[in-house]
Image (cartoon, helix red, strand yellow):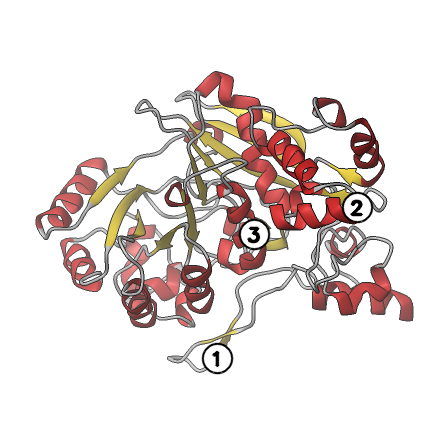
Amino acid sequence: MKHWMSMAIAAVSNSTLLLPSPLLSSTHNHLITPFSFSLTKTSPYLPSIITRPRCFLSASSLTAYDHNFSDLGNGESVAISSKGSKMLLKGMTYPELEKWVQSHGYRPGQALMLWKRMYGNNIWAHHIDELEGLNKDFKKMLNENAEFKALALKEIRTASDGTRKILFTLDDGMVIETVVIPCDRGRTTVCVSSQVGCAMNCQFCYTGRMGLRRHLSAAEIVEQAVFARRLLTSEVGSITNVVFMGMGEPLHNIDNVIKAADIMVDEQGLYFSPRKVTVSTSGLVPQLKRFLHESNCALAVSLNATSDEVRNWIMPINRKYKLDLLLQTLREELCLKNNYKVLFEYVMLEGINDSDEDAERLIELVKDIPCKINLISFNPHSGSFFTPTKEERMIEFRNKLASAGLIVFLRLSRGDDQMAACGQLGKVGTIQAPLLRVPEQFRIAVGSST
């Protein structure tokens, strides 16, 4: 029992599985906790989290896991595959890979050749046999010490509009979903997940019903983009954009998300343009500031309401980080960045946030913030009590914003017949995040009596 507890403490305190702190509501003076599963011995999710530790540990925690983790010698931590003690290659940035290759006695040039075969040259290698042109001894070393794949392909589902939903199985048996969205204008986007489930409990999001199971490692995030290019480039053309808008709150897993984004934009590898890699957040203000300081990738903020009252209900994170704080932080931070616009996402819910008054408040809220606005059609799912705003009303709302000089786009549903649209990813189990009490003025709109 003592040994089990020491392992649990090491894994929880040092790994990427960091559940959110309770949120203090300043208006009601009580704690609001975004829904996540408790790490107790009786939790049905504990074994898959603790006993299969694909995570990032600091050097001080290597005592319990010295057979699964290696130190690069500079205090940095690296991801190791749970399959024995092999190095998970896609968990490393290029400088980390170069140091690891050198530690085995090989030149940096060998690291670059390996990197290009994993991420570039239209190879996207998943196996040692796909590393043509590499030194024979180097390939032997890789075969003995390295692991290429972080994900296992489970299934690809194709929607009527050509959208593909890819299901991946993780080493611990959990499943994540990735979406590839073709576009007639030559732009194809891969939407990647950053967590299994999500702790934010946004009331309009199916993934939020799952609660948080765990964070994804950088390798598990990067490989979604690698798989997308490997599997679908021949069918849908070049995949040009990445959006971190799949399962999870990306900035809740900020270390692995920033690392994964860095790998994706590396010029010798996947080579996505930083402005075409967009990381979305529900509004975690400290992490948002860190992201803007440390990454050149684009930022999207899921706004979805024009008052704290409504946002407190449909996005509980607002009870800790209010609209004023969120938007003022953006004003201050974007002053320091040149030619940079934040993308505001606004899911339109009939009778909740789509009135003329909402449009007027939204215009006022984003004043002086360099931005674009995406108006998103709500995608219904099992257990949801919201109704999508009608297209005609969305157009009226857009026109009102555009007349005030804002840059506005309509984003209609893609892939919804395969549950691949925005807010539809994941699979809800028997344990679900709680539905929050509907404010009295919206009970008729949602058909609720509670």
- The residue lying furthest to the top in this view is 235
Q: Is residue 289 above or below residue 166?
A: below
Q: How far across and down, in percent of the image, does residue 167 sit?
A: 60, 32
Q: How far across and down, in percent of the image, does residue 419 sit?
A: 48, 33
Q: Label 3 vs label 1: CA separation?
A: 35 Å
Q: How far across and down, in percent of the image, does residue 96 sit?
A: 66, 50
Q: Along the polypeptide, which appears first: circle 3 or circle 2? A: 2
Left or right: 197 in relation to 64: left
Instruction: Tell me the number on the disc at residue 259.
Output: 3
The residue identified by callout 1 is: 30
The residue identified by callout 2 is: 82
Q: Label 3 vs label 2: CA separation?
A: 20 Å
Q: In which quadrant is the N terminus drawn?
A: bottom right
Foreground disc of the pair 2, 1:
2
Report the number of discs.
3
Residue drawn where x is 65% and y is 29% of the image: 153
Return the residue nearer the eye: 400 or 215. Answer: 215
Q: Along the polypeptide, which appears first: circle 3 or circle 1? A: 1
Q: In which quadrant is the C terminus drawn?
A: bottom left
Amino acid type at mark 2: Ser
Foreground disc of the pair 3, 1:
3
